[in-house]
Image (cartoon, rainbow, N blue to C red):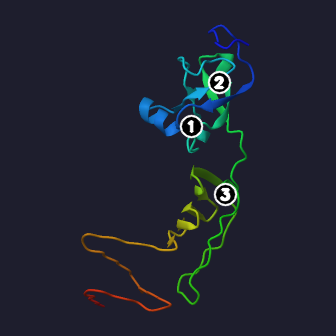
Amino acid sequence: MSQQGSIFEEATGTYIGELLEDMIDTVSRTHKMYCDVYVPEFFSKDKNHPLTYVPLWAMSLPLKKGDKVIVEFYQNDLTLPILYKNPDEIDKGFYEKFEFGNFVTGGSVTKPTAENTLSSQRIGADSYLIKTASYTVIHQNNGFVLIDKNSKTYVYGSEVNIVSTGNVQIDASSEVKIIGTSGIILNGHLKVTK
């Protein structure tokens, strides 16, 4: 095959390519779902070549400059490259059951039961949106926000921060429980009404 593809040249099969810039930069520049892939069998790195279309399944992949990807050409047309798949194995976080980590011993919040993943979308390194039969969880490493099928919401992390430059309001139709295993510290004024 020639170093410089011709519009009439057929491109059957799949080819290894290399990203010339981060995918997010290409999308930001073009406002379309493309990445800039150099395919050495057909294109020159420093000359114009078509951008590679990114299908819906790959939109959440954090493809970076220098990453190797597999490209195919729609209807074998050199002007229509499509991201075929990433040659690396999929991270186990994409399909394995997400474990919730340790909850506070003696606390009032019961840990949800981990379930098999039904669908998942990778957001970034060790960061996923996961759907199971009973809940949806957004997580980064071990921190997560979970909403279950009964509309219960859980927020978990090594440190959970709420910052407000105004009022913080908590309404509950029954109890509000705060358990601190080594105490509760309040600075400022606390008004408790029943």
Q: In terms of secondary structure, where does tag 3 sit?
A: helix
Q: Mark 3–mark 1 contact, CB under 8 Å?
A: no
How far is the residue under mark 2 from the one under mark 3? 30 Å
Q: Nearer the viewer, residue 79 or 110?
A: 79
Q: Mark 2–mark 3 contact, CB under 8 Å?
A: no
179 horizontally vs 61: left or right: left
Q: How many marks?
A: 3
The N terminus is located in which quarter?
top right
Q: Amino acid at mark 1?
A: Lys
Q: Name the mark on residue 65.
A: 1
The C terminus is located in which quarter?
bottom left
Which residue position holds label 3?
93
- N-terminal of the pair, mark 1 or mark 2, is 2
125 horizontally vs 3: left or right: left
Q: Name the mark on residue 121.
A: none
The residue positioned 62% from the left and 24% from the top of the image is 81
Q: Amino acid at mark 3?
A: Gly
- The percent coordinates of residue 87 (x first, y second) are 72, 39
How far is the residue under mark 3 from the one under mark 1? 23 Å
Q: Nearer the viewer, residue 25 or 167?
A: 25
How far is the residue under mark 1 from the one under mark 2? 14 Å
User: Depth-wise, is mark 3 or mark 1 nearer the camera?
Assistant: 1
Q: In terms of secondary structure, where does tag 1 sit?
A: loop
